[in-house]
Image (tube, grey):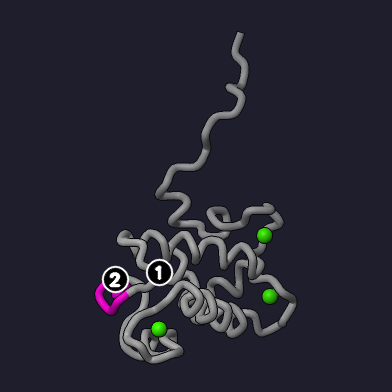
């Protein structure tokens, strides 16, 4: 007798890449709030910073921040992005991706240019 297999893993890594909303939406409410975005950003920062010296140099940051973005994120101008600077920059990007100021990013906001720029900092 055929029965649906319970708890089949339905998410492959490439699907998580394709659907950031699913990947980062910890409370599964269909939107990303700032806490969810910051938690994803902190994980991304750690991934970019294997030597764990609490900052990204130009080379380490290159996959996510180049040129003007690097300079804007580097608030104290020391040539490196600390985790605090990274998260502060992520928060600014979150705000610009959230024009309706409802505290969350929905699918349409994530698809906007500002939303896409934010997502680049998370994966
Ligand atoms: Ca959520
Ligand atoms: Ca810095
Ligand atoms: Ca919103």
The x, y position of residue 84, in whole percent, is 50, 76
* The magenta stretch spans residue 59: yes
Q: Nearer the viewer, mark 2 or mark 1?
A: 1
Q: Residue at x 61, y 22 (%)?
A: 4
List the residue tagged with mark 1: 54
Disc 1 crowd rating (10 Å Cα; few below 14, some 14-19, many 20+) is: some
Q: Residue at x 61, y 24 (%)?
A: 6
The x, y position of residue 21, in whole percent, is 57, 59
Residue toward you, 76 or 103: 76
The x, y position of residue 77, in whole percent, is 38, 91
- Whole-angstrom CA distance, mark 2 to mark 1, is 11 Å
Residue toward you, 75 or 108: 75
* The magenta stretch spans residue 5: no
> In what element is the residue under mark 1?
loop
Task: Give the magenta range.
Answer: 57-62
The x, y position of residue 108, in whole percent, is 61, 72
Where residue 25 sits, quadrant-wise, is bottom right
Q: Decide if ligand 2 comes within 8 Å of the CB at mark 1.
A: no
List the residue tagged with mark 2: 60
């Amino acid at each position: 007798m055929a029965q649906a297999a319970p708890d089949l893993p339905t998410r492959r890594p490439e699907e998580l890449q394709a659907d950031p909303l699913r990947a980062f939406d910890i409370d599964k409410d269909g939107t990303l709030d700032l806490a969810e975005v910051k938690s994803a950003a902190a994980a991304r920062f750690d991934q970019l910073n294997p030597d764990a010296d609490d900052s990204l140099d130009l080379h380490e940051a290159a996959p996510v921040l180049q040129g003007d973005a690097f300079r804007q994120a580097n608030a104290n101008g020391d040539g490196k992005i600390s985790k605090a600077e990274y998260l502060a920059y992520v928060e600014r990007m979150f705000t610009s991706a959230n024009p309706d100021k409802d505290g969350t990013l929905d699918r349409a906001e994530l698809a906007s240019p500002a939303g896409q720029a934010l997502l680049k900092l998370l994966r």
